[in-house]
Amino acid sequence: MAQKIDGKAVSAQIKDELKEKVRELKAAGKEITLAVIQVGEDPASTVYVNNKKKACEYVGIRSLAYELPEDTPEAELLALIEELNARKDVNGILVQLPLPPQIDENKVIKSISPVKDVDGFHPWNVGALCIGEPGFLPCTPAGIIQLLKRSGIAIEGRECVVVGRSNIVGKPMSILLLRENGTVTVAHSRTKDLKAVTKRADILVVAVGKPRMITRDYVKEGAAVIDVGVHRMENNKLCGDVDYEDVEPVCGAITPVPGGVGPMTIAMLMHNCVESLHLQEN
Ligand code: GUN
């Protein structure tokens, strides 16, 4: 039977480590504050934002919630970010994506001060990631690296295949795996003979946004399979981009959905909030 990679347990471990660090920082008179902005009422976004607020509470980080209406003009959001950029008592700023169509997502990402960009989406942080300089790492890919390391899955020298090339997951994931000395291939919707490519993987990371697309014929026997997808099925249960029941008997290790990558994203957001103090020192 495959090793179940337990994101819930690993994220709990990381949050407990951070809770202790935050306690020490508080004793030294340093408090951490995260501003969380949601525009509109997308139900999935509301769930994610609430989970982020809950994690802040657990770890001991102060969270400021900004819930703006769906029709908020772009200028209003940019003005709020400018105000939060200037506030000395705000360490992290997170704008939940996606944003409504009247707001330019890239413009918003670029307006956040790079030293408060705890999502790691600002071009400065993306550039720092590429050349290995200090900066915020994007939470989902950074969480996957932690999940692999803390589950005893080696990356160095191994064949890593990332399926998907988004700015939030696929691209930064490939760079982080490279940084860990993996041999990295990025596959995507235009890849010819995708199965032949994914079957090479010792570590297969899937972030395609298609429910249960990856079946056992995409997976090498014994591979570690990381599923970034989250989809709600007709029966109201969640599933990933990987067909878990089909793949589990042939792979060596696999993340469940829910309870795999999802909780790690939030744990790494908390990590970035703590890290922000170092980046804001100079
Ligand atoms: N929407 C989906 N994933 C994310 C994330 O990691 N951060 C933000 N801000 N929005 C998201």
Image (cartoon, grey):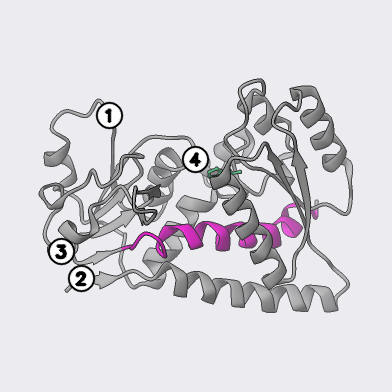
- N-term-proximal mark, 1 vs 2: 2
* Residue type at tag 2: Ala
Label 1 belongs to which residue?
189
Please state the extent of the stretch shown in magenta in the rendering.
Answer: 255-281
Disc 4 beta carbon < 8 A from ligand 1? Answer: yes
Picture quadrant where residue 184 is located: top left
Q: Mark 2 and mark 1 in contact (Cβ < 8 Å)? A: no
For the residue marked with disc 1, what is the amino acid? Ser
Which badge, 2 or 3, comes first in the chain's sequence? Answer: 2
Q: Spatial distance from mark 3 to mark 4, Cα to Cα?
A: 28 Å
- Whole-percent x, y for residue 71 in the image: 72, 26
Residue furthest to the front: 235
Q: Quadrant of ligand 1?
A: top right
Please, what is the three-letter code of the amino acid marked with disc 4? Ile
Residue ID at (77%, 78%): 24
Of badges 2 and 3, the one in the foreground is: 2
On the image, numbered disc 2 is attached to which residue?
2
